[in-house]
Image (tube, rainbow, N blue to C red):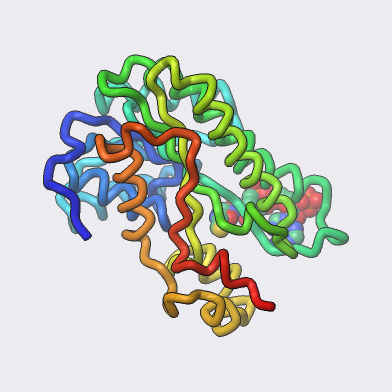
């Protein structure tokens, strides 16, 4: 699948957690379609190596700034700085996330709090930090949050992430209702298992669950990072202009195949 070249020319996008995993596929796709892209994450070495890689393999110049989505004031500064470099913020992709598998009875308060702070509070912080810029977007700002299909069900071993992602989905609905008047759309994407990501490597393959997970994917394979990136383009471009408060599962149909 490909979009018309230059479909995002003139747009400026920030992707949190854009140096690695699904975020890096989103950056490549937005950049390839003409957007000016900035990435934010905690580790400078990851950011620099990703920016060099984007340049070497895709000939894309990506701006970067360190920032922790858990720090509301810090992330505002990072976004303002990046907006200055990339020409504002038309598109915000809330992709940064943390997760680990732990039975709820063993989950420490700090473990619970850490994931809620990164995923849910972090998304709130980023939306607020981007808001003044999104409001100024000529064709209407776009917020796209990366959730998971697991948020719509129970997620044994990941109560923190499931609760956070459900909260994110509801935040997107509320922002769709509140910020529509500012011409800002808020939507979310729920990826299924995407190959080559930490989520699949650490939470599925290393747990010995690959076959079990694949059996539940009706289309029979793990997804690709590009599948998620294409969904982001749909929401970011004119194709998604009348869509707000909506979720799109990109999971090979697996959410509806949960066994008898
Ligand atoms: N099982 C049980 N508890 C765990 C854990 C695990 N696998 N990993 C972390 N924790 C607990 C820690 O023990 C700590 O709680 P404690 O103080 O009660 O011991 C708490 O979580 C915070 O851990 P810490 O390592 O200090 O947090 P951090 O901010 O450095 O890291 C995480 C954040 C925990 C989300 C870490 O997994 C991370 O940085 N991941 C980044 C990438 C990622 O998860 N991507 C998502 C893939 S789907």
Q: Identify the residue at image location x=27%, y=40%.
A: 239
Q: Residue furthest left?
A: 5
Q: Is residue 249 visible?
A: yes
| Vertical order, 1 against 94 (above or below) | below
Q: Of residues 251 and 164, which is closer to you in this image?
A: 251
Q: Of residues 201 and 46, which is closer to you in this image?
A: 201
**Residue 22 screen position, x and y as percent:** 41, 56
**Residue 76 screen position, x and y as percent:** 49, 22
Q: Residue furthest bottom?
A: 211
Quadrant location of the C terminus in the rendered image: bottom right
**Is 228 on the left-hand or right-hand side of 154?**
left
Q: Identify the residue at image location x=38%, y=46%.
A: 47
| Vertical order, 8 against 56 (above or below) | above
Q: Identify the residue at image location x=56%, y=64%.
A: 255
Q: Of residues 186 and 41, which is closer to you in this image?
A: 186
Q: Of residues 103 and 192, which is closer to you in this image?
A: 192
**Is 59 on the left-hand or right-hand side of 254?**
left
**Residue 240 screen position, x and y as percent:** 32, 38
| Vertical order, 152 against 80 (above or below) | below
């Amino acid at each position: 699948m490909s979009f018309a070249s230059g479909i995002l020319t003139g747009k400026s996008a920030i992707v949190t957690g854009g140096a690695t995993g699904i975020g890096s596929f989103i950056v490549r796709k937005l950049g390839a379609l003409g957007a000016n892209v900035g990435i934010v994450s905690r580790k400078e070495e990851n950011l620099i190596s990703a920016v060099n890689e984007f340049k070497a393999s895709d000939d894309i110049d990506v701006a970067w700034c360190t920032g922790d989505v858990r720090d509301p004031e810090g992330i505002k500064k990072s976004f303002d700085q990046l907006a200055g470099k990339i020409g504002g913020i038309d598109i915000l992709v809330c992709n940064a996330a943390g997760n680990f598998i732990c039975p709820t009875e063993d989950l420490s308060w700090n473990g619970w709090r850490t994931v809620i702070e990164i995923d849910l509070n972090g998304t709130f912080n980023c939306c607020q930090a981007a808001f003044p810029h999104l409001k100024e977007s000529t064709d209407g700002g776009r917020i796209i949050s990366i959730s998971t299909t697991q948020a719509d069900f129970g997620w044994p071993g990941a109560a923190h992430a499931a609760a956070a992602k459900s909260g994110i989905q509801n935040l997107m609905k509320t922002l769709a209702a509140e910020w529509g008047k500012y011409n800002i759309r808020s939507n979310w994407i729920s990826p299924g298992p995407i190959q080559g990501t930490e989520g699949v490597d650490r939470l599925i393959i290393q747990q010995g669950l690959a076959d079990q997970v694949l059996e539940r994917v009706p289309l029979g394979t793990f997804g690709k990072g590009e599948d998620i990136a294409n969904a982001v383009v749909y929401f970011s471009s004119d194709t998604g202009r009348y869509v707000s408060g909506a979720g799109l599962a990109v999971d090979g149909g697996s959410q509806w195949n949960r066994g008898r």
